[in-house]
């Protein structure tokens, strides 16, 4: 067990504590957002209204971590495609497919009545044509589908662009992708959402927005692109990195200010035009600046290590997978215990059970496959 806890808390390796704090923040935001499906305290509702943005923080983190890994390989030669894809599969597939199996084998755990077809979960295409109104069970897997598509395409894209003129214009490429996303969302909003507002139709407005704008990959590249841009800066912009290393706390303040602007932009009806068009890139840049700050040795996030955030960060994937069905299963037992439906204790218990469920998932499924992955990588070396 000692080896397991050293693994889960990463005590034997150089560790970026700042990223742990942000990853822990991301999963807490997502948890509180989804807990709004039940009666809840006022503070949960207030934070949870912006909790969906935790997914955007996850996207920025993934963009940086995967982009940095691949760029380091390019700097020493070429991308090792087989090793990369095997490593990603061993990290993501076992726990994910177990949860998919549970959802389709034991309908009692489903938090909503409907669920997307099995083939979409198996092919990581569930984020396309997803009808939240009728397929709400395990609907949050839409973000995992986007990340898998990203893992598939980014190595190929970087390998094709490496050494080309386009590669040397990386900043403009990143900005171009952000602008393209802005234009696509603008067109889709005018086509899909404008009639709802012109005719004051509220029924199915949220479902249509999610299906055509919020879930599709081509509308949600902002965070991933910002993360890859950070990786590019850390690998190919030594002057930027030198400045960042000295001004981590300034970046932290700027990131928080941008996040506050994003919060107030989305605070009203986030389905309207301007939040849809400019809100997502602004939010991604805000979280990107926070990630950039967290990578700086001068930043308080980097220098402050906390085992609680390290633990939550290590279990964040498992929490993301299982928290919805665990919250659903807990409601009747907590009712029988007489706990207030909108009480803090109820939220705390659900949160703790989600952590314990993720810990069990990590011990039984994720950790053995991580050990196997480590052995395979050692053999290759």
Image (spheres, rainbow, N blue to C red):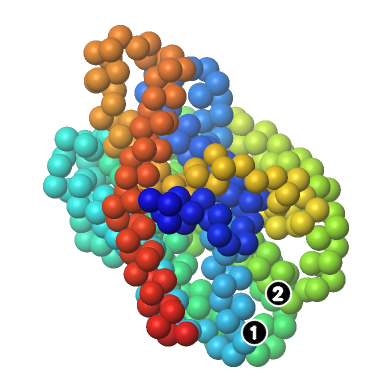
Residue located at (61% from left, 42% from top) = 306
**Residue 378 visible, this angle:** yes
Up-down relation of residue 353 to residue 90 (above or below): above
Where residue 232 appears, as percent x and y from the top left, is: 68, 72
Where residue 271 appears, as percent x and y from the top left, is: 52, 39
Where residue 30 appears, as percent x and y from the top left, is: 48, 39
**Left or right: 364, with 250 as reference point:** left
Helix, strand or loop under label 2 = helix
Residue located at (56% from left, 35% from top) = 50
Up-down relation of residue 200 to residue 278 (above or below): above
The residue to which callout 1 is attached is: 75
Q: Do labels 1 and 2 touch, CB within 8 Å?
A: yes
Give the quarter of the image for residue 171: bottom right
Residue located at (56% from left, 29% from top) = 47
Up-down relation of residue 43 to residue 169 (above or below): above
The residue to which callout 2 is attached is: 235
**Left or right: 65, with 256 as reference point:** left
Where residue 45 appears, as percent x and y from the top left, is: 51, 24
- Give whichever of discs 1 and 2 has the lower sequence position: 1
Q: Quick one: 112 or 378, which is closer to the camera? A: 378
Residue located at (29% from left, 30% from top) = 328
Q: Residues within 10 Å of mark 2 (few under 14, many from 20)?
A: some
Q: CA distance from mark 1 to mark 2?
A: 9 Å
For residue 191, the mark is: none
**Left or right: 30, with 239 as reference point:** left
Q: Quick one: 306 or 75, which is closer to the camera? A: 306
């Amino acid at each position: 067990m000692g080896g397991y806890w050293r693994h889960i808390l990463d005590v034997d390796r150089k560790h970026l504590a700042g990223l742990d704090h942000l990853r822990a923040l991301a999963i807490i935001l997502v948890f509180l957002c989804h807990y709004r499906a039940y009666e809840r305290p006022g503070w949960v509702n207030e934070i949870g209204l912006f909790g969906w943005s935790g997914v955007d923080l996850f996207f920025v983190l993934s963009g940086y971590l995967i982009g940095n890994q691949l760029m380091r390989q390019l700097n020493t030669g070429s991308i090792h495609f087989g090793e990369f894809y095997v490593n990603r599969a061993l990290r993501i597939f076992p726990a994910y497919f177990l949860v998919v199996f549970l959802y389709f084998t034991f309908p009692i755990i489903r938090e909503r009545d409907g669920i997307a077809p099995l083939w979409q979960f198996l092919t990581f295409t569930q984020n396309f044509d997803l009808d939240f109104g009728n397929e709400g069970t395990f609907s949050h897997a839409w973000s995992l589908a986007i990340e898998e598509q990203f893992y598939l395409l980014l190595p190929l894209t970087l390998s094709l662009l490496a050494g080309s003129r386009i590669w040397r214009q990386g900043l403009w490429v990143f900005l171009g992708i952000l602008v393209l996303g802005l234009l696509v969302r603008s067109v889709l909003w005018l086509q899909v959402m404008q009639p709802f507002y012109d005719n004051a139709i509220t029924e199915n407005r949220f479902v249509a927005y999610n299906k055509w704008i919020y879930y599709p990959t081509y509308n949600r590249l902002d965070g991933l692109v910002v993360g890859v841009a950070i990786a590019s800066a850390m690998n190919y912009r030594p002057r930027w990195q030198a400045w960042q290393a000295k001004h981590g706390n300034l970046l932290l303040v700027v990131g928080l200010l941008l996040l506050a602007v994003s919060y107030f932009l989305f605070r009203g009806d986030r389905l309207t035009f301007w939040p849809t068009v400019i809100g997502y890139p602004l939010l991604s840049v805000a979280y990107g600046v926070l990630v950039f700050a967290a990578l700086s040795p001068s930043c308080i996030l980097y220098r402050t290590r906390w085992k609680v955030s390290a633990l939550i960060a290590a279990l964040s994937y498992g929490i993301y997978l299982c928290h919805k069905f665990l919250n659903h299963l807990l409601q009747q037992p907590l009712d029988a215990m007489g706990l207030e439906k909108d009480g803090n204790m109820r939220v705390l218990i659900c949160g703790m059970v989600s952590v314990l469920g993720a810990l069990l998932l990590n011990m039984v499924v994720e950790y053995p496959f991580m050990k196997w992955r480590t052995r395979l990588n050692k053999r290759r070396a």
